[in-house]
Image (cartoon, rainbow, N blue to C red):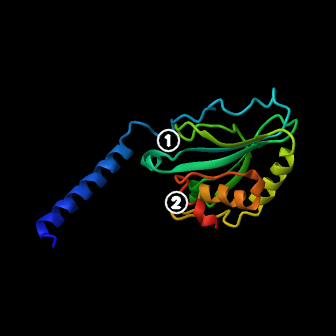
Amino acid sequence: TMRISDFRSKQWLLGSLAALMAMVGCSSGSDWRTASRDSAGIAPDPAKTPEAVIHVYGADAWGWRGWFAIHTWIAVKGTGASSYTVYDVVGWRGYHNRQVMRIYQDLPDRHWYGAKPRLLRAHQGEGVDRLIAAVDRAARDYPWKNTYKAFPGPNSNTFVAWIALQVPDLDVDLPISAIGSGYAD
C-alpha cells in the first residue's frame, strides 16, 4: 500500500517537473516573433532545377512542444516553375477567423520558428507533376480546413497524413513525433 507521505512526495515531484518544463519553455530566451524563418538550404534552387520537385518537411514544434513533437508541411515545384508552393496547416490562423489550411508561394524549407527542417520525403523528375496535381486536389479536399486542435488533431500532421492517404504514391511515412497524424485515419 502507498502511504500518504509517498503520494505527497510523488505529487510534489510531478508538480516540480511540470513547473520546470513550463519555466524552460517560457524563458528560453527566444521569441517566436524573432526566431529564424530563413531557408535551410535544403530545397533545390528553382532557377537551376527545371524538373518537378515534391518535398515533405518536418521540424521541431515551437517551444517545449519541440521536445516531443514536430510540425510537417509539403512544398512542391512543377516542371519549369520559378517558385515553390507550400501546403500547410497552422492553428493560430484560426484565432483570427482565417482558414488554418493554406496554399501559398513561399520558401519551401523555412526554419520552423528557429527549428531547422528535415526532409522526410523527396520526389524529383519524371512523373512528379502528376503527383503534384494529386497533392493539390487532396489539399483542396481536406475536410478540416477551418478546424485545428493540437491533440489529438486535426493539426498540421493530420493534414500531411491526409494527403499521404489520398496520394499513396507520395510514399511518405511520418515519424511517431508527428502527433495528430493518426487522426487522418
Amino acid type for the residue under numbered disc 2: Ala
Decide which of tag 1 and tag 2 comes sooner along the chain.
Answer: 1
User: Quick one: SS at disc 2?
Assistant: loop
Residue at 32% across / 46% down in the picture? 23
User: Quick one: SS at disc 1?
Assistant: loop
Q: Residue 76 appears in which quarter of the rendering?
A: top right
Graded by Cα atoms within 10 Å as few (under 14), some (14 to 19) or many (20 or more), the crowding at tag 1 reads few
Visible residue check, residue 1: yes
In this image, 103 relative to 149: left or right?
right
Q: Is residue 40 above or below residue 70?
A: above
- At which x and y percent is residue 170? 75, 51
Can you tell which of label 1 and label 2 is closer to the viewer?
Answer: 2
Amino acid type for the residue under numbered disc 1: Trp
In this image, 160 relative to 17: left or right?
right
Residue at 72% across / 63% down in the picture? 142
Q: Label 2: which residue?
A: 150
Graded by Cα atoms within 10 Å as few (under 14), some (14 to 19) or many (20 or more), the crowding at tag 2 reads some
Q: In front: 65, or 7?
A: 7
- At which x and y percent is residue 105? 75, 42
**Mark number displayed over residue 99:** none
Q: Label 1: which residue?
A: 32
- At which x and y percent is residue 31? 46, 39
Residue at 15% across / 64% down in the picture? 6
Q: Residue 75 appears in which quarter of the rendering?
A: top right
Q: In front: 39, or 96?
A: 39
